[in-house]
Amino acid sequence: MDLRRLKSDLMITGIIIISLLGMIPLIHIFLTVAWRGINVIARDPLGVLFKEPPIPGSEELGGIGPHVLGSLILISIASLIGIPISILSAIYTVEGMSKRLGPLTSLLVRIMIEFPTIVIGLSVYGAVLLIEEFINDLVKIFGLGGHIYIPRFNPITGAIALAIVMIPYVYTQSEDGFKNIPHHIREAVYSLGFSRIRASIVLSSYVKSALLSGIMIGVSKILSETAPLLFTAFGNDHYVTRFPDVFLNPIGSMTLWIYKAGLSPYDNWIDLAWAAAFILLMIILVLFVISRYIIYKR
Amino acid sequence: MKNIENSYVLRIKDLNVWIGDRHVLKNINLDIPRNTVFTIMGPSGSGKSTLLRTINRIIELYQNVKISGEIYLENIKINDQNTRPENVRRLIGMVFQIPNPLPHLSIYDNVALGPKYNKLVKSKKELDELVKWALERAYLWDEVKDRLHEPARVLSGGQQQRLCIARALAMKPKILLMDEPTSNLDPVGSSKIEELMIELKKIVTIILVTHYPFQASRVSDYVAFIYDGQIIETGPAEEIFTRPKNPLTEKFVTGRIG
Ligand SMILES: Nc1ncnc2c1ncn2[C@@H]1O[C@H](COP(=O)(O)OP(=O)(O)OP(=O)(O)O)[C@@H](O)[C@H]1O
Ligand SMILES: [Mg+2]
């Protein structure tokens, strides 16, 4: 009996030690990013947040303003596209608008999670080329002159790629939320004579914490994505502020900046990459804590 | 003849229900008189809940259900393709076995939800009045009038069930289906709801499901005894309880099956 006890204690101690060992690299990364990031930001907090990056070879620090703003714009547009699509599809599959298409949607979305995100970026790029070609064929058929050009690198294509990355995460959380509604609650709602659409709205308020945590997870996911932006948003070290231009020109993001500056030989660029990494880490940490809190409260 | 037709608020003709391969309800024929408590009693698994769910078509939320037969609400057929289930559910309210207020909504909103979204009221004032009216009818107003905006989950089980009754009443239904409304309540909570039913039949026809013969005898005007998906016997309550014709019914009301 004592031997069994001893064995199980040894096992537990072993597991704890191994988990701690496993966490060391993680903690190391976290502390490094925090240390280096804070040091850079402390030198000129407002400058880092708002200035444009320095030209290569210059001594000044500059900032990652266009990339912070770019990430903000990309994430916002991607959320505007991705969140409604995800939640509506989840409602569509669970609230049984269609017996056959519902499960199929669910399956396809679960496959989508497995797509490498660079493929998603490339597909959006490819889609733009195809659409352009199609339009130009039409132009030719109707005998109109000229050549139509669709800008490939801009916030819209970037946001579409990010939205596609985001959808499966928000979708699966929402679908689980709706699936876990107890039957007696669903019956209560339907017994009040609501149409499926109205009932779904009422039920959404019942599962709002699942929907919210799905949104948090989705947003954190795309915050840290670089690959889908390589062929879409493309990156831009300068502010583009005038109205239509913003949507027609390449746009930066913090992840693209980290990718580009981190590989560069310039010390001040590399410093700014650490700053960007730290800012991203903090945002994701906050989102993570909020979503854990929501799940915990549920 | 016309008069007899009109005294029935609900008529069920040759109703059969299959869930998957199971023939759950077999050739049900029932006529429910207006402004009465009509009780469907029978042992567990006999198909009572299924019958109620078929009447307000909430059964259509399940998969693999097949239904034949006809149901008329005031001489209008309500179980065909031309009638939308939500229209049926507006006229036929339901109270369930487990008290199921929407726990994240306030007491007020639980009652107001139905009339508000179904556009039964024109103004906030009218809605307030309707909520008060429904809560009074459900004997709950005095207990909650000072905390209408607290979440419904703070109420006791018995209060929650009366809130569900108020929620259904606020839709001004013609029929109220009650599926073992007291089975999860203590004796005090149960007797409150029994009193309530007798009062409520002035404004709505109640179809009650129970597997307690004693409850049935206390509140019912009419009783149908259902066994294995079939109506064995139906008639005025006193007849069923004093002179049952079928030996099975007699066994049930004397507590020997169930
Ligand atoms: N969703 C379902 N899927 C499969 N079978 C079902 C379903 N609902 C009911 N049944 C079957 O139909 C029969 C009648 O069930 P029902 O719930 O109507 O009985 P009941 O008389 O209400 O019983 P209880 O007193 O226990 O509530 C049962 O045999 C049950 O197994
Ligand atoms: Mg039942």
Image (tube, coloured by chain):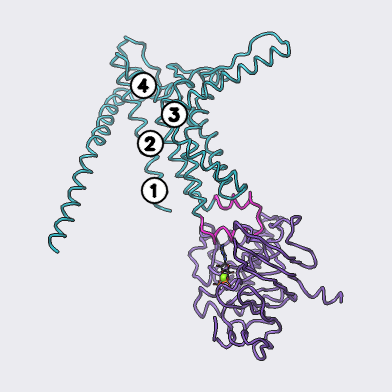
Chain colours: A cyan, B purple
Q: Residues within 10 Å of mark 2 (few under 14, many from 20)?
A: some
User: Which element carries disc 2, helix, strand or loop?
Assistant: helix
Pointer 3 indicates a residue of which chain? Answer: A
Q: Which residues are magenta?
A: A181-204
Q: Residues within 10 Å of mark 3 (few under 14, many from 20)?
A: many
Is B49 situated above or below A173? below
Label disc, if present, on residue A293 of the rendered structure: 1
Q: Earlier in the sequence, mark 2 or mark 1?
A: 2
Judged by its main secondary structure, the magenta piece is: helix
Q: Quadrant of residue B24?
A: bottom right
Q: Earlier in the sequence, mark 1 or mark 4?
A: 4
Residue behind label 2 places its C-beta within 8 angstroms of ligand 1: no
Distance CA(mark 3)–CA(mark 4): 15 Å
Q: Earlier in the sequence, mark 2 or mark 4?
A: 4
Label disc, if present, on residue A259 of the rendered structure: 4
Q: Position of residue B60 (x, y in %)?
A: 64, 58
| Residue lying at the far right of the rendered structure | B1
Q: What amino acid does circle 1 point to? A: Tyr
Is residue A150 shown in magenta? no
Ligand 1 image-quadrant field: bottom right
Q: Earlier in the sequence, mark 3 or mark 4?
A: 3
Disc 3: which residue: A117
Pointer 1 indicates a residue of which chain? Answer: A
Is A139 situated above or below A36? above
Q: Residues within 10 Å of mark 4 (few under 14, many from 20)?
A: some
Q: Nearer the viewer, mark 3 or mark 4?
A: 3
**Dots 3 and 4 on the same chain:** yes
Q: Earlier in the sequence, mark 2 or mark 3?
A: 3
Disc 2: which residue: A284
